[in-house]
């Protein structure tokens, strides 16, 4: 399982995602609004909007909240820009941040402040991007899978590269170019995902001691709390020792 997904799983075990539900809904709503503004409100004709709505449903966002986010696109005069930031945390851990912002100066200042406060530093564009590769990632609740063998075969035929099970979830990885076919196959099978999308997975990972790793994760948490930040990717290795400490603290 990717480090990004392992970090999400750890937060879920700690109940952290439930306590940050309103923050998650806010980020999902922003993506829905931007997707509807760029490609129109027709979910069948707008693949980005369709994906955003699927992910919102996977996080149990109420239907009326989703509909408000879509309709907001017609009234909202804000102009959101997609921005990315690249830098390093403690121990040389690479961090890639994706943002949606309607105020560039505010976002730049906030991201720079977070890196500085937690002993990291920002780099120029391209300084860490090469350390990640873009893959399709689908997170499926285990109770959605009934005929396991048939399901796995269908996924492989659709282009799935890897299927990895944990206690409660199945994570499916595909090449970027096979993302659409895997997504379509899941839909045909009537399988609801908790989330799906293109993610940046590390080509190599960095292993740190527990204390150094916790410093990096504090930076990542601070970035994730920023309203302008949509995704944070990193190449910190979530070791068994680190996972046990984080879940139990």
Image: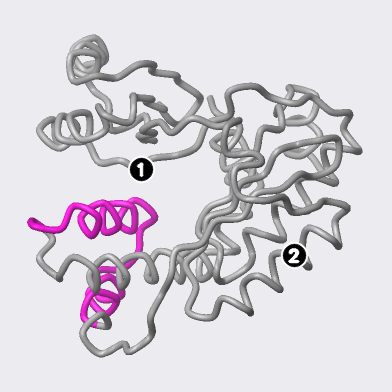
Residue where numbered disc 1 is placed: 197
Residue 167 has which mark? none
Q: Say what secondary structure mark 2 lies in.
A: helix
Is 56 within the magenta? yes
Q: Counting other residues with Cα less than 10 Å from the Cα at mark 2, is it few (<14), some (14-19), or many (20 or more)?
A: some
Q: Which residues are magenta?
A: 44-71
The answer to whether 141 appears left or right of 223 in the picture is left
Q: Is residue 242 above or below residue 90?
A: above
In depth, the one of 34 and 5 nearer the eye is 34
The image shows residue 186 at horizontal and vertical percentages of 19, 32
Residue where numbered disc 2 is placed: 112
The image shows residue 199 at horizontal and vertical percentages of 45, 39
**Which residue is depicted at the point 77% across and 63% down?**
114
In depth, the one of 171 and 157 nearer the eye is 157
**Which residue is depicted at the point 10% across and 33% down?**
188
The image shows residue 35 at horizontal and vertical percentages of 27, 65
Q: How is the image coloured?
A: one colour
**Which residue is depicted at the point 68% across and 24% down?**
205
Q: Is residue 156 above or below residue 42?
A: above
């Amino acid at each position: 399982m990717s480090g990004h997904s392992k970090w999400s799983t750890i937060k879920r075990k700690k109940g952290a995602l439930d306590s940050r539900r309103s923050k998650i809904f806010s980020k999902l709503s922003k993506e829905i609004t931007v997707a509807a503004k760029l490609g129109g409100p027709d979910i069948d004709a707008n693949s980005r909007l369709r994906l955003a709505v699927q992910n919102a449903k996977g996080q149990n966002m109420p239907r009326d909240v989703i509909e408000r986010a879509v309709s907001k696109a017609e009234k909202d005069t804000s102009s959101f820009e997609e921005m990315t930031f690249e830098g390093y945390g403690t121990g040389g851990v690479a961090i890639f941040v994706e943002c949606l912002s309607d105020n560039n100066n505010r976002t730049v200042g906030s991201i720079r402040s977070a890196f500085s406060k937690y002993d990291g530093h920002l780099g120029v564009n391209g300084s860490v991007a090469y350390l990640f590769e873009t893959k399709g990632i689908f997170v499926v609740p285990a109770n959605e899978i009934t005929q396991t063998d048939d399901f796995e075969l269908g996924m492989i035929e659709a282009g799935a590269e890897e299927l990895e099970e944990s206690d409660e979830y199945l994570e499916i990885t595909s090449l970027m170019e096979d993302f659409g076919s895997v997504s379509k196959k899941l839909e045909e099978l009537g399988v609801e995902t908790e989330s799906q999308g293109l993610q940046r997975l590390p080509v190599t990972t960095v292993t740190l001691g527990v204390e150094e790793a916790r410093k990096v994760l504090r930076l990542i948490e601070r970035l994730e709390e920023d309203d302008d930040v949509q995704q944070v990717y990193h190449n910190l290795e979530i070791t068994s020792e680190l996972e046990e400490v984080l879940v139990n603290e």
